[in-house]
Image (tube, helix red, strand yellow):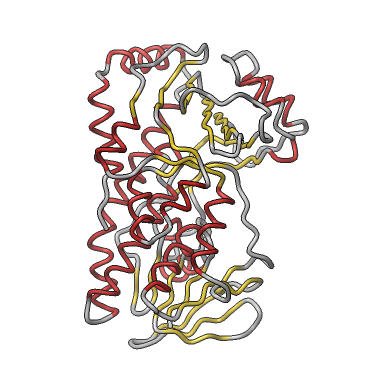
Amino acid sequence: MILIAGAGIGGLTLAVALKRRGVPVTVLEREAESRPAGAGLALSPNAMVALGHLGVGESVERAGAVIAKSAILDSTGSPLGAEFDVGQLAKELGAPIVALHRARLQEALLHAAGDGTVRTGVSAVRYESAADHVTVVCSDGTTMRADLLVGADGLRSAIRAQLIGDGDPVYAGYTSWRGVTPAGAVPKPARMSESWGRGERFGIVEIGSDQIYWFAVANAPRGGRDEDVTRELLARFGGWHSPIATLIERTPAAAIVRTDISDRRPVSRWHEQRVVLLGDAAHPMTPNLGQGAGQAIEDAAVLDRCLATTDTIDAALRRYETLRVTRANSIVRGSRTLGAVGQLQHPIAVWMRNTVLRLTPASVGLNQARKLMRFSP
């Protein structure tokens, strides 16, 4: 039996993969209910290819919106470089870019995992690992014995804390706000976009069901709070190009989520004996490349493949690390670098950045996207 700590995207994707092969699996989720939450996200072709191999690609695509165009703009709405035909790129890579509400993605994965797979209201607190099994101590005082424990319990993973012990996540220096408009509140945008200002950014993407997902990012001290989030966001972004002010105004304040952005220093060891890490527990990354969910899904697909095609669990975990560590960690670093560039604040640095973006050929960005979004399970 395989035990997965955490019913997030990575943990549920692995559960789906294992159940398809008839492997007994239980997912522990600390929330009292499997209640999908969050805002929006975009799944690149790498993630959609992996989900397609697990038989859930079509249901996920139906739950969201396929993205055909994307662009980086400045705060006035002027392009910073060429618009990208991501629809054509998706054809080349074998799957579309799909943007959807995180709740709908989790619902699709929960449905595919099946009833009884997720045990709610309990989390993995610590473990005792041996050569041929692992014993997990749960938050309700019970213990469970498994052949393998997969730590998919996120940025502040209890499993990582015991396995690696590298302390708290590292604050990136900027915070974010995320919101989803009520259905029909705002006309659909013609493309997915991210607008860059001075130490601030704003992203807009259609996610299906007549909803628009938006996010705002700003340099700020850690731990900030908003007294009136709508008013304070309008003070920052209300003078930016249309429809940014409308998006903020038409999103209920209670539905706007503020999150400080953090990651961790990449590490090259994700396992010991019968314990292994996956997703944010293994390689938490800032959201600047839009690959947090995608890399967790890749992890799940590769780990399942390694478990299915190697003679022992030990060999499977070593193979999993060999196949995943370099790619995932490079994306952690790349996302951190892109965030630093996007959050530049000094006027001269911003002018130089924008000038470079406008002079960079579209082919350069497309080649980088190909490398980032290409994946084969």
Where does the image place residue 253, in percent across and percent down from the top left?
Answer: 74, 35
Q: Is residue 331 left or right of residue 36?
A: left
Residue 48 at what x, y percent from top left? Answer: 37, 49
Front-most of 214 and 141? 214
Q: Residue at x 34, y 88 (%)?
A: 132
Counting the numbered discs, the total is 0
Q: Quadrant of the N terminus?
A: bottom left
Quarter placement of the C terminus: bottom left
Q: Is residue 127 left or right of residue 370?
A: right
- Residue sitting nearer the eye, 26 or 68: 68
Image height of 248 relative to 273, above or below: above
Extreme residue toward the right, this view: 227
Residue 19, quarter of picture: bottom left
Residue 41: x %, y % from top left? 50, 42
Identity of the residue drawn at 53% across and 33% down = 206
Q: Is residue 335 above or below residue 350?
A: below
> Could you say which quadrant of the image residue 369 lies in?
top left
Is 339 displayed left or right of 257 in the figure? left
34 left or right of 330 in image:
right
Residue at position x 52%, y 57% from top?
108
Does residue 286 lie above or below 138 as drawn? above
